């Protein structure tokens, strides 16, 4: 049994307060100072200490492996706020036991807008991984682990060997998530699935004192892994799990450091990168005719497009995108792509309850989803004006 530990690194370019009165003012849509301040704080609490512990684990346990995905917007902010974080990422990759995963540069909903935007963002991400790390990813993930038969065909066309997806019962039809599968729509694309109960035990429940398994120790968790049947266990979670979502005082960093030694106590357990795990023969083809994700309890696109606010904002983004492509202006295109980042739509979530609602509120800095919507639409309206001006089209007052 191989354990695939995959961690995702992303920070969005959060919007500044952009009012209706700011239309045409030339103000930036993005609060650069605030974004970099947030990044510095997370670097101190999470990125540096966790990367240092991963480096130690790799040095002390030759069998240990980890896989990472890093968005382009994360790297942009790291260059400005904490360049030593990129140095640590390079050091991790140079061990030869860390795989980098491909995705959209802007962590965007590009897979839902007309071509060629998705191809362009995946190409931009490939280029930045080559430039920064000399890496050529073989495995692709979509934003928030979105997956469908159509996306598998896209991955095949882009010559990726595999994709990451949620190990959701609705797609597996009784089959376990602990095997490698292939896409029914693109048989050359192998699928590595997230074991969401075991992933969420760490990602969401680790510091919950009301959880009946609290506290979770590395010894206990390794025992759960050892008792899980199959060929591969996909432990997929946000990198910020370690030190940010769960503060250092919870013991999460010690848990991570102790896990390789506890896993080693079980002779049938080992580690693999996402690329190494593709060496397993696929058990069966899987068909997912709809788009599923790893977000919220429904595992669909509802986290970003589940209500009228979100759908209205996204339709506006798509319409403005047509003008942006025609305008042929790099600055306008870059701003539009930053506005296509999934986080902006995530902040407009209003339809949930319980755990889902709490997670959305945790990530948002807006007073309400309606504030997030109004702010976003003001920025998108201004971007439309800029595109029309670039095209020489008169703007009606």
Image (tube, rainbow, N blue to C red):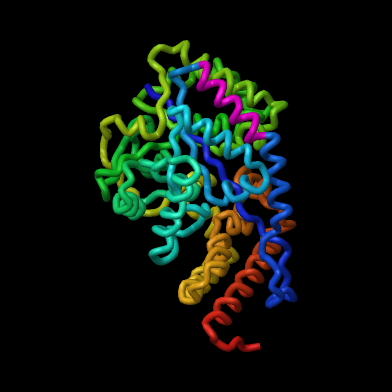
Please tell me whether residue 148 belongs to the stretch shown in magenta: no
- Tell me which corner region of the image, top left, top right, bottom left or bottom right, holds residue 88: top right
Q: Is residue 319 left or right of residue 1?
A: right
Give the magenta range.
46-60
The front one of 115 and 146 is 115
Query: Vertical placement of 212 versus 349: above or below?
Result: above
Q: Is residue 355 left or right of residue 322?
A: right
What is the quadrant of residue 392 in the picture? Answer: bottom right
Instruction: Find residue 36 and report its horizontal and vertical position in percent.
Output: 69, 49
Q: Report the residue at 55% width, 57% height from top.
A: 341
Q: Is 82 drawn above or below residue 223 in the view shown?
A: below
Residue 351 pos. (x, y %)? 60, 56
Q: Position of residue 253 (x, y in %)?
A: 63, 25
| 53 drawn magenta | yes
Magenta part, dominant SS: helix
Say if 17 sits above or below 362 in the image.
Answer: below
| Residue 350 in view in this figure | no
Residue 35 in the image: state x and y as whole percent.
Answer: 69, 51
- Residue ID at (38%, 28%): 232
Q: Nearest the camera: 348 or 81?
A: 81
Among the 4 quarters of the image, the one containing residue 307: bottom right
Tell me how many marks there are: 0
Is 28 positioned to the left or the right of 236 in the image? right
Looking at the picture, tell me which residue is in the foreground, 55 or 187: 55
Q: Residue at x 51, y 31 (%)?
A: 92
Does the rendering let one see residue 383? yes
């Amino acid at each position: 049994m191989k354990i695939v530990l995959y961690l995702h690194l992303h920070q969005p370019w959060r919007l500044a307060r952009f009012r209706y009165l700011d239309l045409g003012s030339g103000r930036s849509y993005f609060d650069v100072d605030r974004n970099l301040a947030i990044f510095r704080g997370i670097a101190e609490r999470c990125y540096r200490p966790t990367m240092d512990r991963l480096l130690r684990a790799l040095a002390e346990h030759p069998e240990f492996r980890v896989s990472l995905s890093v968005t382009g917007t994360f790297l942009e902010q790291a260059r400005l706020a904490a360049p030593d974080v990129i140095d640590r990422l390079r050091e991790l990759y140079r061990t030869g036991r860390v795989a980098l995963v491909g995705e959209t540069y802007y962590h965007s909903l590009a897979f839902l807008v007309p071509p060629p935007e998705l191809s362009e963002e995946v190409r931009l991400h490939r280029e930045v991984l080559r430039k920064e790390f000399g890496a050529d990813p073989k495995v692709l993930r979509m934003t928030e682990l979105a997956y469908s038969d159509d996306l598998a065909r896209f991955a095949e066309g882009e010559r990726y060997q595999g994709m990451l997806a949620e190990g959701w019962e609705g797609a597996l039809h009784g089959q376990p998530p602990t095997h490698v599968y292939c896409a029914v729509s693109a048989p050359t694309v192998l699928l590595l699935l997230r074991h969401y109960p075991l992933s969420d035990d760490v990602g969401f429940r680790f510091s919950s004192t009301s959880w009946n398994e609290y506290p979770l120790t590395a010894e206990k968790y390794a025992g759960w892994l050892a008792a899980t049947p199959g060929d591969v266990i996909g432990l997929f979670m946000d990198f910020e799990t370690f030190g940010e979502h769960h503060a250092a005082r919870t013991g999460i960093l010690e848990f991570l450091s102790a896990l390789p030694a506890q896993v080693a106590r079980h002779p049938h357990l080992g580690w693999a990168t996402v690329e190494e795990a593709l060496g397993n023969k696929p058990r069966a083809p899987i068909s997912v005719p709809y788009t599923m994700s790893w977000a919220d309890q429904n595992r669909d696109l509802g986290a970003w497009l589940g209500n009228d606010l979100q759908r209205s904002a996204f339709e506006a983004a798509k319409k403005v995108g047509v003008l942006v492509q025609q305008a042929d202006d790099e600055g306008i295109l870059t701003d539009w792509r930053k506005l296509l980042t999934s986080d902006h739509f995530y902040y407009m979530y209003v339809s949930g309850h319980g755990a889902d609602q709490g997670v959305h509120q945790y990530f948002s800095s807006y007073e309400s989803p309606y504030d997030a919507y109004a702010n976003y639409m003001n920025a998108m309206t201004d971007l439309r004006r800029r595109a029309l001006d670039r095209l020489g089209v008169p703007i009606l007052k």
